[in-house]
Image (cartoon, rainbow, N blue to C red):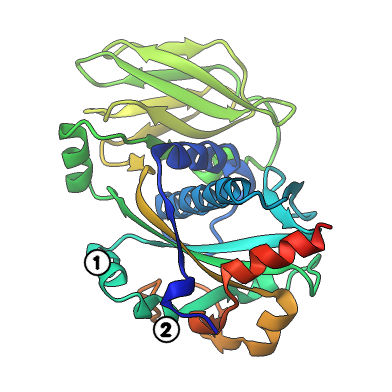
Amino acid sequence: MITESNLIHLPYTPDLTEGGIVYALRSLPNTFNRAGGSPYDRLRRVVGSVAVELAFRRFLAGQDVPFEVKGARPFTDPDRYDVALGGRRCDIKSFLISYRDQIAEMKRNPQVVLNAPALVPSDQNAGEGHSEKDIYLFAFLSGLVAASQADLQKVIYKKQPHHLIHVMPDNWMRPSKWNTLGSLVLKSESTEAQVVDVNGQDEGRDMQTVSVKLPPNTRVQIEVEFCSVAYIHSKSLPDARIGIHSSARNETHLIGVMEWGNIWIYGMDILLAGWLTSAEFNQRAKPIREGARVFQYDRTRTKNLGVPVHELRSIADLLERVKEWSK
């Protein structure tokens, strides 16, 4: 059992968002939006999740707690690396809280966090490769997003950081046949020059980026060969359509001015709540149906298992155990 005094707050810095974005975009071709919904919402969740993990590693180093970084389990994201504590894999389940009223309530009354469910998706919990000694650690990230066009315009006007991308359709990102896309030609309908970064994979499935300057209404051919295009990045919000054409597929994809997403997380605070071993979690957890309303979500998109946060073990207890396990 834990109380408010057991919750640990970690400071949030912009470099955590930057690290999260690098990971989220690099792994984009290898990850699937199993929960449905907007790809930009999913990317923001990934950015937040990685930011929390990076902050946790920083916290461990500051506490002189030994840890390792291990590769992901087979058949999961090949770019993913998990923290291992005393030889036990630590799976961090973090929840992005982006509604202002909820963030204010968490500050005013931490009991709402203690009463919230610590969630693990049922399919992930049932996946192969788990050990009963593995650790589930639960955290909450308070941070704002600028997902709507109105919020994005405010961010741009105030010169706040943002990261604009357009996620390409699946047939561009994960083509069924791994062949070159041939000559790629881009064209902007803007009256001003635009600079975009084309990001995708080469024949060996390595990620590559090509920066392209697009004069007004002028076709520009990319000399580098791609077998897939995952996303287009623009430092400024385009004010007109941009098209990309594949000669090998004789296909053009048009990007409208409203089809760009800002995946920057404006983080404020990270709350480390508590932990359980995988075995303890499975003993105590109760099923939470898909579509249920919980503190973290208006409605859950998948089936989950949950344990009330106040029934977790404290982070301080974990740190002491890790020091013993590492001897």
* Residue drawn where x is 32% and y is 41% of the image: 259
The residue lying toward the viewer, choosing from 313 and 164, is: 313
User: Callout 2: helix, strand or loop?
Assistant: helix
Where's residue 13, x and y in %? 40, 42
Where's residue 262, x and y in %? 34, 42
Categorize mark 2 by other alpha carbons within 10 Å: few (<14), some (14-19), many (20+): some
- Residue that label 2 marks: 115
Where's residue 30, x and y in %? 64, 46
- Compared with 34, 28 (above or below) is above
- Residue that label 1 marks: 104
- Compared with 249, 291 (above or below) is below
CA–CA distance in space, label 1 to label 2:
16 Å
Q: Quadrant of the N terminus?
A: bottom right
- What amino acid type should be assigned to the residue bearing mark 1? Ala
- What amino acid type should be assigned to the residue bearing mark 2? Asn
Q: Quadrant of the C terminus?
A: bottom right
Categorize mark 1 by other alpha carbons within 10 Å: few (<14), some (14-19), many (20+): few
- Compared with 203, 305 (above or below) is below
Total marks placed: 2
